[in-house]
Image (cartoon, coloured by chain):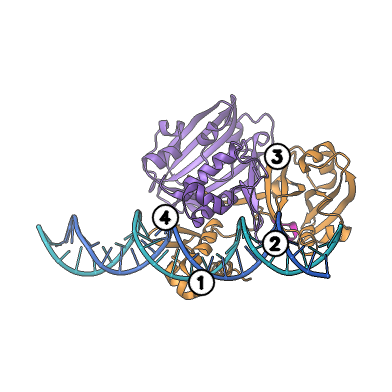
Chain colours: A purple, B orange, C cyan, D blue
Amino acid sequence: MQKKYMTIYHDLVKKIQTNHWPKSTLLPSENELTGLYHTSRETIRKALNILAQNGYIQKVRGKGSVVIDISKFDFPVSGIVSFKELANNMQLPTRTLVRELALVEASQDIQEILKVAKSDYIWNVVRVREISGEKIILDKDYFNTAYVPVLTRQICEDSIYDYLENELKLTISFAQKEIVVEEPTDEDRDLLDLEGFSNVVVIKSQVFLDDTSLFQYTESRHRPDKFRFVDFARRVR
Amino acid sequence: MQKKYMTIYHDLVKKIQTNHWPKSTLLPSENELTGLYHTSRETIRKALNILAQNGYIQKVRGKGSVVIDISKFDFPVSGIVSFKELANNMQLPTRTLVRELALVEASQDIQEILKVAKSDYIWNVVRVREISGEKIILDKDYFNTAYVPVLTRQICEDSIYDYLENELKLTISFAQKEIVVEEPTDEDRDLLDLEGFSNVVVIKSQVFLDDTSLFQYTESRHRPDKFRFVDFARRVR
DNA sequence: AAGTATATCTTGTATATACATGTTGTGCAA
DNA sequence: TTGCACAACATGTATATACAAGATATACTT
């Protein structure tokens, strides 16, 4: 890491999480922090602003930065996080079952969503996520082959995002997400342990790269009783 | 508005929304913008960073700022937005029915959530939101009387947030939100037009003021078929 | 003793400069 | 014609200074 304000940010996060500065106390003032980190006030302020954005502190003019330890929860689906990254932070045992991996012509719907031509081929991946032995989540991924030419079963069982970022060197940047509740499809009923639930929670995401190109569409279909979405929000005026 | 970077931000938002710079084109460079707005580059950069945060542009190093018009959707429940503010942006007719407004001792649960003492009184508000004549949303609000001493039926029918911000001069600042799916309670079945749905989507929010004090807890209970949550997310590394 | 003015702390805004680093097109050389 | 070097321009990072404005403790005045 070479970006100074980022290393300071991460250091401050760690210190807040380890209770170095307990909840609802004040951080050292910006001027003191410049001394501690041997840097300028503007650099400190950049780090502090990211802390505020992410719900670690609340800045109060004339007073200082209050720690608000909205403790980063068990299952933060906010942001863009791969299942593997989630699983790593979870206490429960997880498993991924690849049910489908095929290069196919896009359906009408997917054509429009991914903005590809009629004859274009796309990757179609269907995976079941098992948590504590129960089939809880059905992930249906569609990738534009212009950006993801190759996919293997091995990659899908491990982590596609890991492959995209570390092997293909793609820079995943932002996503448009939508959460709705739907009736289960036959596929849902077939592949998930729905236990009589008459709804599934569906997270639909369009995911974009650094250069604003749309490369992925995903539907993540969850059993409703196991679904939880937490978010930190700021009031905008 | 006296903050220069905020007026520039709002001006740029307006110009993007009115297609002055169409989707996937480049904004003028930072240097050009300093000329247009008669200001310094850092001030322009502050405005641009807020645009990027809110999903209007994607900054690409060496190239410029690409407009990504993730068009602000019909029902943005992301952020902290009052029902009245939502209703004003909606095409459909809405109505609010106040079913309860009482000063009561907090239950065990609410005591813990709002962090008030056993004997403390809190405001308990129950409102039904009608959209196109259907009872779709049940809002259950709990306010700490230390910050909201007075509430009237009139205020609850109009907009509590409007009252808090413009009359009481409270500065609502941030919230911790959680979305889960639950089985309907008797109250849900009684007050909402559930039409046989066996689930409700519940948004639970703790809302905080400027000085980090917790003043409100809310449960917003939605009929699942009418629920939609959209969000813009950035990948953090 | 009470209240008020003030000094001094805090964060917020605006501006300037310097250099690093990524992108793109121009023009020269093979 | 192809390919490479380089200039020109874009954004990113780090630093400095000045002043505005909110919070707070101190000391002084009444």
Task: Please identify the quadrant where the C terminus of chain A is shown.
Answer: bottom right
Callout 1, which amino acid? His
State if disc 4 and disc 2 touch (CB < 8 Å): no
Q: Which residue is mark 1?
A: B20
Callout 4, which amino acid? Asp
Of tags 1 and 2, the one toward the viewer is 1
Could you say where residue B61 lies in the image, as x and y percent from the top left? 40, 58
Residue A194: quarter of image: top right
**Gap between marks 2 and 4, in whole Å?**
33 Å
Dot 2: few (<14), some (14–19), or many (≥20) neighbours within 10 Å? few
Query: Closer to the camera, B65 or A30?
Result: A30
Q: Are marks 3 and 1 on the same chain?
A: yes
Could you say where residue A87 lies in the image, as x and y percent from the top left? 54, 32
Callout 3, which amino acid? Val
Dot 1: few (<14), some (14–19), or many (≥20) neighbours within 10 Å? few
Is B93 one of the magenta-colored residues?
Answer: no
Magenta region, residue range: B81-87
Dot 3: few (<14), some (14–19), or many (≥20) neighbours within 10 Å? many
Residue B210: quarter of image: bottom right
Callout 2, which amino acid? Met
Provide the chain ID for the residue under circle 2.
Answer: B
Is label 1 in a helix, a strand or a loop?
loop
Q: What residue is drawn where x is 72% and y is 46%?
A: B205
Q: On the rendered structure, is A105 left or right of B129?
A: left
Is label 3 in a helix, a strand or a loop?
strand
